[in-house]
Image (cartoon, rainbow, N blue to C red):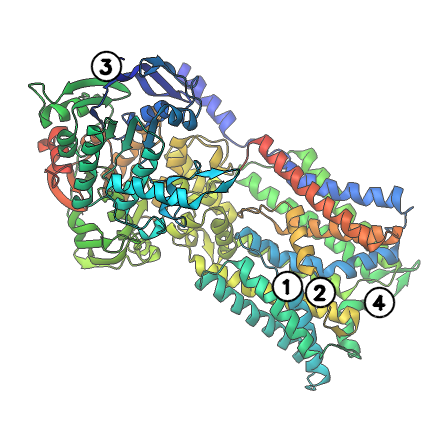
Amino acid sequence: MSDLILKMKDIVKDFSGVRALDGVSLDVRRGEVHGICGENGAGKSTLMKVLSGVYPHGQFEGQIEFDGEPVEFRSINDSEHTGIVIIHQELALSPHLSIAENIFLGNERASRGMVDWHETNTQAQVLLDRVGLKEKVTTQVLHLGVGKQQLVEIAKALSKDVKLLILDEPTAALNDDDSEHLLDLIRGLKDQGITSIIISHKLAEIRAISDTITVIRDGKTVDGFSMSDKDNSTSRLIRSMVGRPLDNLFPPRTPNIGEEVFRVEHWNAYHPVDTHRKVVNDASFYVRAGEVVGFAGLMGAGRTELAMSLFGRQYGTRVSGKVLRRGKEISTRSVNDAIANGVAYVTEDRKRFGLNLIASIAANVTGANLQGVSKYGVIDLHNEIEVAEEYRDSLNIKADTVSQRVNTLSGGNQQKVVLSKWLYTTPEVLILDEPTRGVDVGAKYEIYGIINKLASEGKAIVVISSELPELLGLSDRIYTISEGRITGDLLREEATQERLMQLMTAGEN
Amino acid sequence: MSEASTKSKKETTGRTPVVGINARDYGLLGALIVIVALFQFWFTDGKLLLPANFNNLISQNAYVVILAIGMVMVIIAGHIDLSVGSLVAMIGAISALAIKEWGQPVWSAILISLLVGAAVGAWQGFWVAFAGVPGFIVTLGGMLLYRGLAIVLLTGGTIGGLPDSYVAIGARWIPEWLGRVNELDVFTLLIGILGALGYVATQFKSRAKLKARDLPRESVPVFAGKMAVIAGAMLFFAYLLAQHNGTPYVLILLGVLVLAYSFVLNRTVFGRHIYAIGGNRFGAMMSGVKTKWVDFFIFVNIGALAAVAAIVTTSRAGAAQSGAGNFYELDAIAAVFIGGAAIQGGVGKISGAVIGALVMGVLNQGLSIMGVDSAWQQVIKGLVLLAAVAFDVMNRRRSGGA
């Protein structure tokens, strides 16, 4: 028997021309807990999807060996039969079924098509005891909190005779107690001989649980060390994660910063379903005219939730706090209030929240300010086209006509349409959430140029981004946010990726 | 040098390309023409377009057009309304009662009907928009509710003997003001000519505006061909009606409704909001569209249009019957989907819905003339609906659209 349970070698995976994995290798020893670290978009999740057969054999290059044997998974079923089970960040339980039904979903305890309920429930009870969940097996899953649902997922994995358990951000949505319990459970499973891979942004946690850590960056394995190595420090981890040099990706800009335009004081918001969870916690910040302010935070830190709760209360419940524009309190209670008060929000998910994909460029551009092209509720269609043409020229949207449907455009051009739409509301404050997500490098540069131009016109700009180099390249000032709290306010000169990463993971150490 | 050449290339390819034929819109019109031709020349031996039959085609299917106009707006917004057939029966009963039992004049009975229609629409709109109950359920309930009330109001029977001025709406013609020449009603011919001229003039005007702003427009043959077909059809239909009893009142009503609602959907902020909601409800909300109020008014509107359909239906029948309007909702929904609307919402046009209604009408009329049993008529209409939508779906998949 080989000492390695899993060996992935030179994995390469392309998505329509974009290289997500560029020769990643991963060796996991039998019976260890193996941590995988990397920035958002480094390729961790893609790698796990390759491993679990979500991307079937043949859609990527490279070899996978499991238990010393080469394997070619064609589906998740294949990998689960071999003993590899992945638990995704978004839990995949069926809320109206019981715990026991969920555990054996797709793997029912049945004979001749009839479910054996006695068998189902007794076996489920055994598994719940193993993961330490004190709930009745007949309880509907929707009555469980996220932490307990996580345990049900693990029980489900155990029911499949798991040999290698992969957990993608298992504690991202958990509170401290639940996280601690989960980590204890993983240690317990290790004692029973189950190997685990854990993907996490929480560096303290990953250092506490792992025996070995692999760092992935830009689709490549860049570092790997054992916790028994001499240099196993957090700073080594951070250095490896962000180690990319800042190249000349950003058009130059001379900031011309004026007076304060936008200020938020003591902003709070609670999770809309789990109403006791505070997602935005006493956040205060300000932006000045002509200033680009970055917001850095890990996934789930509350960046988007902060922005969306500010913009017309489109996120959260029990939202409270004050918003001031040029020192005077304004309402952003509804989207229309926010727009009328000069606030615009460019969403991170343009397909879901930003665009009407089946409508024309022109209809999208005027979508948030139809008053601008209409009189007494009647739209001047020719004027609308002229407006859209102006933005097509000034933002360089590549399309034959502005009557073209938005779903025929590339990601970068779609993003320019969303930008046009919000610019047409003539905002004073522009909140850009992941403005370059899913945008190719060339269009990124153009969008940076647009942001710089808007700042030079005196707009106050907030950029939320998962990419630290992007924030460092664009911003005059950067706030860090961690677990809903603002943990830092750094000038560009004093900000480094290492420093930001420390503040973004603050509160967990 | 290379910079200059790329720049000029951009100008020639990036500016004012010709808009191709919109295959979907014209395909639909083509399908209608094919169906008409099939019935006219093969199945009915030229009887489909006899003047009297053409007159009946319009007056018997007016309700489909009226309801389809309301329905297309509901469907674009991503909802459905199953209640309009029952609502036609209930409001028909109320308008007959208003005249015969409550002693109201005809104008007042019509006003009452429209108000009741709008109020019922507001009731349904409230549940859909503000209480969040799916429109399918709200209107399924309404379907039973209004049918039941119609039977209660009419105590199971019918109310006949409606005054002439009421009956005229659905069953009479505009008087022959200008007399007849060569057996043809001059007034009807005049309306046909004015309609065709008006159509041609607006087309030229809009093309001129596009040209003035150097915006893309159709190529000359397409533009001319489209105008020739549509204006020619208008003149031909006027000629047919002029041979019979002239212009039915209901045709004028349909014309006004089609023009008004095309304007609402294409040109007003409200219309644009309907498309925005159907295309991406979250996106519309995040752009400040008051999605709940838009939903509400869509239902108020179809309630009022159901009242118009009720008046037309009741007046044509000359009596209110509790069984009136049976399956009307399905006719309207079928017309809308034949007319190219998408079940997911966001897509649909008044012109499509009208053509869809005409397809259904021609099938009704043509099959009746052929003497096809009504059971088999339903079988055929069902298959046509399935075929039309399946064709559209496959077409869209091939062209890679949404």
Marker disc for residue A3: 3
Q: Which residue is mark 1?
A: B84
Q: Quadrant of the N terminus of chain B?
A: top left
Q: Which residue is mark 2?
A: B325
* Cα–Cα span, label 2 and label 3: 77 Å
* Cα–Cα span, label 1 and label 3: 72 Å
Q: Secondary structure at mark 1?
A: helix
Question: Which tag, 1 or 4, sits closer to the chain's start?
Answer: 1
- Contact check, label 1 and label 2, Cβ < 8 Å: yes
- Contact check, label 2 and label 3, Cβ < 8 Å: no
Q: The disc labelled 3 sits on which kind of residue?
A: Asp
Question: Which tag, 4 or 2, sits closer to the chain's start?
Answer: 4
Left or right: residue A273 compared with residue B172: left
* Cα–Cα span, label 1 and label 2: 8 Å
Asked if A63 appears above or below A134 in the picture, the reply is: above
Marker disc for residue B176: 4
Foreground residue among B205 and B154: B154
